[in-house]
C-alpha cells in the first residue's frame, strides 16, 4: 500500500502524493499463482480432469479458458488429461473445436502456438448419458493409461443444480469415484432439506475431504486480500469492531439481466443465487476472528463461528424486488413471484459485532455493476468543524471501501480541511489499486485459482457442509415467509421507500457509483 497510496479526490482525478508505480519483478507465472501460504513452486501431481456440462456456459466462459491458461502458465501437472462430458454427443475433434472457440472468445491466452497444440492433444470427450456410463469409464481408463502411474481424478460438476444428482449417479455407475476429488457448483441446495439431501448423495460416493463446494468469490485475489488487509497490518484490525464501526454494507448489484437463463433463475431468485451463496461468504471473511493460521482447518473454523453467530434473517428486515417486465422473460413463469433483487439486514451476534447491521444487497438490472464492501465508522463525539453537505456527500462518517471486482481496490474516505483562509471540510480519499501497485498481468482468475487449489487438495477457499447448512438454517424464516416482491424500474437501485426503511438511520449508498442511491438530503450545512 505504501508504494501506491494516492490522495484522490472523490472524482477520481487524484492529487497523487506518491505517484503510483508498478512493482518490478514478480513476473514468473508460478510465483504469482498461489497465496503466500502455498509454496510457489508447488504443482499438483498428475491428474485426469473431467468437466461435466462441458458444452455449457460456465465451461465455455471460465473452465476451458481457465484450464488452458493454467497449462500455458506451467501450473498444470506434468501429465494431465481433460475429458469433457455432456449429454449431447461430441467427437473428440468436435470437443477440441468447442474448446478452441471458448478459449478464443473468453480466454486471456489465445489458442495458438505450441501451448495450444499441447493442450488440445490432451482433450477428449465422454458421453454423460446415464444410459452410456461405459463411455465415461472408458475415457477415464484411457486417459489414465496415457498418463501412466496412478494419476488423481478431479470431477467438476459444471451443470445446473437440478443435474447434480443425475451426474453423481453417472459417476457412481461408471465406477470412477474412488479416490477422486469433486468440485460442486453453487447454489448448494435451495434450502436446508435439499442441501442435506445433496450432501447425502455426495457422501455416498465421496468423503468430506474429497468435496470442494465452490464459491468463486472466494477465489478472487481481492477477497483473499481482506485477510491480508486485516491480519497482516497493525493499522486496521484494532478498529475492526463495533466500538468503531457503525455498519457494514456488502453490495453486488448487476446491470445484467437473465442472459438467457430464465428457467434457472426463476427457480432460484436473487437471495438463493447471490446472498446465501456469495455475499454471506464474503461476510464471513469480513467478520471473522483472526485464525491461528491460514490453513483450511483454522480458516474454515473461524468463518463457521461467524455463521453460527448469525441471527436468523427476519423477513421484516428483508426487501425483495422484481424489475418490471420480469414475468414476460423467456423461461419465467407467468405471474412469477421470484425476486430479482434482494436486500437483507444481517446481524452477527457476538462480542465483536453485536448490534451492528450488515446490509447485503444484490440484484439484476440495477443501476450499476459493482462488488463492494463498505465499513462505515462512528462519527467523532464532537462536531468541531463546519462542513457542507455538497462537499461531504456521504456525510461525516469515515468509510473503508473494499472494491472486490477484479482487479480490486481499497479506499478510505475521510474529511480534510479545504485549502483557504477558513476552516472548512471537504471529502478526501486514499486509494490503493491493485492494478497500480502490483503486476497483475500474471494473476489468476478466481476459477483458475480454485481449480488449482482443488487439485492441490487445499480446501481453505471452499465451503464446508456445516457452513452451508447453517446459512440455509438462518435463511429459513425468510424462505418460509418471504415478503411480497415489490416492483422496481430496470436501471434503478431497487424498490423505494422499502430500501430506505431497511437501512434507517443509515443511508445505503454505493461509493464511487455516482449519486448515492438513497440519500435525499438537501445541500445544507451539517
Ligand atoms: N454460467 C456462469 O457464469 C456461472 C457462474 C458461476 C456459477 N455457475 C454455476 O455453474 C453451473 C453451470 O452453469 P451454466 O451456466 O454453465 O449452466 P448451463 O449452461 O445451463 O448448463 C451446463 C450444461 O449442463 C447440462 N445440463 C443442463 N441441464 C441438465 C440436466 N437436467 N441434466 C443433465 N445435464 C444438464 C447441459 O449440457 P448437455 O445438455 O450437453 O448435457 C448444459 O450445457 C450452475 O450450477 C451454475 O449455478 C455458472
Image (cartoon, helix red, strand yellow):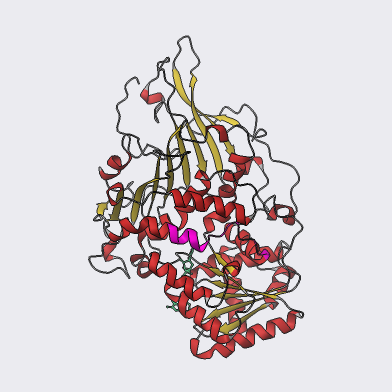
Placement of 476 over or under 64, stated as above or below: above
Residue nearer the viewer, 523 or 101 = 523
Does the segment drawn in magenta span residue 463? yes
- How many marks the image carries: the answer is 0
Q: Residue at x 50, y 44 (%)?
A: 287
For this view, does 453 lie left or right of residue 311?
right
Is there any visible trace of residue 110 in the rendered image?
A: no
For this view, does 210 lie left or right of residue 161?
right
Point out the image quarter for the N terminus. Answer: top right
Give the quadrant of residue 395. top left
Point out the image quarter for the C terminus. Answer: top left
For this view, does 438 lie left or right of residue 202?
right
Residue nearer the viewer, 42 or 312 = 312
Residue nearer the viewer, 75 or 313 = 313
Q: Residue at x 55, y 39 (%)?
A: 410
Q: Which residues are magenta?
A: 456-470
Query: Residue 477: percent from the left, percent from the top?
Result: 31, 56
Give the quadrant of residue 232. top right
Give the quadrant of residue 459. bottom right
Does the segment drawn in magenta span residue 31? no
Amino acid at each position: 500500500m505504501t508504494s501506491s497510496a494516492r490522495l484522490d479526490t472523490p472524482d477520481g482525478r487524484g492529487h497523487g502524493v506518491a505517484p503510483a508505480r508498478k512493482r518490478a519483478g514478480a513476473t514468473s507465472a508460478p510465483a504469482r499463482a498461489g497465496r503466500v501460504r502455498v509454496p510457489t513452486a508447488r504443482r499438483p501431481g498428475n491428474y485426469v480432469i473431467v468437466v461435466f456440462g462441458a458444452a455449457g456456459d460456465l465451461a465455455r466462459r471460465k473452465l476451458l479458458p481457465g484450464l488452458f491458461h493454467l497449462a500455458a502458465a506451467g501450473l498444470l501437472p506434468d501429465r494431465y488429461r481433460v475429458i469433457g462430458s455432456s449429454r449431447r454427443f461430441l467427437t473428440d475433434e468436435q470437443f477440441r473445436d468447442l474448446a478452441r472457440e471458448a478459449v478464443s472468445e473468453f480466454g486471456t491466452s489465445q489458442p495458438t502456438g505450441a501451448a495450444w497444440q499441447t493442450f488440445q492433444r490432451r482433450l477428449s470427450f465422454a458421453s454423460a448419458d446415464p444410459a452410456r456410463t461405459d463411455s465415461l469409464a472408458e475415457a477415464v481408463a484411457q486417459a489414465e493409461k496415457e498418463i501412466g502411474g496412478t494419476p488423481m481424478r478431479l470431477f467438476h460438476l459444471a451443470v445446473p443444480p437440478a443435474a447434480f444428482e443425475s451426474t453423481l449417479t453417472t459417476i457412481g455407475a461408471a465406477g470412477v469415484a474412488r479416490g477422486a476429488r469433486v468440485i460442486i457448483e453453487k447454489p448448494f441446495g435451495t434450502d436446508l432439506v435439499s442441501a442435506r439431501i445433496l450432501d447425502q448423495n455426495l457422501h455416498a460416493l465421496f468423503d468430506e475431504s474429497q468435496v470442494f463446494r465452490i464459491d468463486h468469490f472466494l477465489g478472487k485475489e481481492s477477497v483473499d486480500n481482506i485477510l491480508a488487509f486485516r491480519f497482516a497490518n497493525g493499522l486496521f484490525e484494532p478498529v475492526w469492531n463495533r466500538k468503531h464501526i457503525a455498519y457494514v454494507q456488502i453490495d453486488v448489484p448487476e446491470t445484467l439481466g437473465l442472459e438467457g437463463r430464465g428457467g434457472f433463475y426463476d427457480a432460484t431468485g436473487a437471495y438463493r443465487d447471490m446472498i446465501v451463496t456469495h455475499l454471506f461468504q464474503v461476510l464471513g471473511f469480513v467478520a471473522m476472528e483472526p485464525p491461528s493460521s491460514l490453513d483450511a482447518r483454522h480458516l474454515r473454523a473461524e468463518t463457521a463461528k461467524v455463521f453460527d453467530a448469525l441471527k436468523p434473517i427476519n423477513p421484516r428486515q428483508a426487501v425483495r424486488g422484481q424489475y418490471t417486465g420480469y414475468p414476460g422473460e423467456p423461461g419465467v413463469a407467468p405471474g412469477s413471484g421470484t425476486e430479482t433483487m434482494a436486500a437483507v439486514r444481517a446481524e452477527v451476534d457476538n462480542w465483536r459485532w453485536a448490534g451492528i447491521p450488515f446490509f447485503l444487497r444484490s440484484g439484476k438490472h440495477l443501476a450499476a455493476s459493482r462488488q463492494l464492501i463498505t465499513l462505515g465508522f462512528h462519527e467523532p463525539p464532537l462536531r468541531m468543524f463546519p462542513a457542507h453537505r455538497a462537499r461531504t456527500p456521504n456525510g461525516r462518517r469515515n468509510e473503508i471501501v473494499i472494491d472486490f471486482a477484479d482487479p480490486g481496490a481499497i479506499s478510505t474516505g475521510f474529511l480534510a480541511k479545504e485549502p483557504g483562509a477558513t476552516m472548512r471540510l471537504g471529502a478526501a480519499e486514499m486509494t490503493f489499486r491493485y492494478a497500480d501497485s502490483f503486476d497483475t498481468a500474471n494473476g489468476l482468475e478466481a476459477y483458475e485459482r480454485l481449480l488449482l487449489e482443488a487439485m492441490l487438495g487445499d480446501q481453505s477457499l471452499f465451503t464446508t457442509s456445516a457452513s452451508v447448512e447453517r446459512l440455509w438454517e438462518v435463511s429459513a424464516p425468510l424462505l418460509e415467509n418471504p415478503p411480497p416482491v415489490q416492483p422496481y424500474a430496470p436501471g434503478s437501485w431497487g424498490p423505494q421507500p422499502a430500501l430506505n426503511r431497511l437501512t434507517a438511520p443509515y443511508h445505503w449508498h454505493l461509493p464511487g457509483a455516482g449519486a448515492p442511491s438513497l440519500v435525499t438530503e438537501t445541500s445544507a450545512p451539517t
